[in-house]
Amino acid sequence: MNTQELKRILDSHAAWLRGEPGGQQADLSGADLRGANLRWANLREADLREADLSGANLSEADLREADLHCAYLRWADLHGADLRWANLRWADLRRANLRGADLDD
């Protein structure tokens, strides 16, 4: 997925979260986001099932209630990310940096 397409999806998702007309929940299921810079991204309630986020920078990202079922997060930087109520079932978190991440539910 190229940077422009990702930005369009994230902008539409932000509008959806604010309840604005035309906004749409982010569907990044199965997306190839290897090495993507998603620092500070608002991915709350986003669909990231089976997405490849290996090596991605998700530090300080808002991933509350995101669906990361079977997501590939190996070597991802989740430092300080908000993962409360996120679905991490079967997610591959090997070697991921979870220092300071909020995993409370």
Image (cartoon, grey):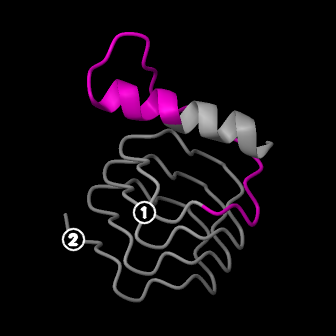
Vertically, is 62 above or below 16?
A: below
Helix, strand or loop at mark 1: loop
From the image, which quarter does the C terminus lie in?
Answer: bottom left
Seen at 46% across and 21% down, the residue is 24
- The majority secondary structure of the magenta stretch comes to loop
Is residue 34 among the parts visible in the rendering?
A: yes
**Do the numbered discs 1 and 2 sit on residues whose CB atoms are within 8 Å?**
no
Q: Is residue 16 left or right of residue 70?
A: left
Q: Is residue 36 above or below residue 101?
A: above
Residue 54 relative to residue 61: left or right = right
Q: Nearer the viewer, residue 1 or 3?
A: 3
Residue 69: give x, y in percent of width and height: 52, 51
Check disc 1 and report the residue beneath it: 61
Label ID, residue 104: 2
The answer to whether residue 28 is visible is: no
Q: Which residues are the magenta region?
A: 11-37
Nearer to the camera, 6 or 44: 6
Label 2: element kind:
loop
- From the image, state whether disc 1 or disc 2 is nearer to you: 1
Residue appearing at x 53%, y 85% in the figure: 97
So how many labels did they put on this image? Answer: 2
Q: Residue at x 72, y 34 (%)?
A: 5
Instruction: Compare marks 1 and 2 and give the one earlier in the sequence.
Output: 1
Q: Residue at x 45, y 40 (%)?
A: 46
Residue 35 magenta: yes
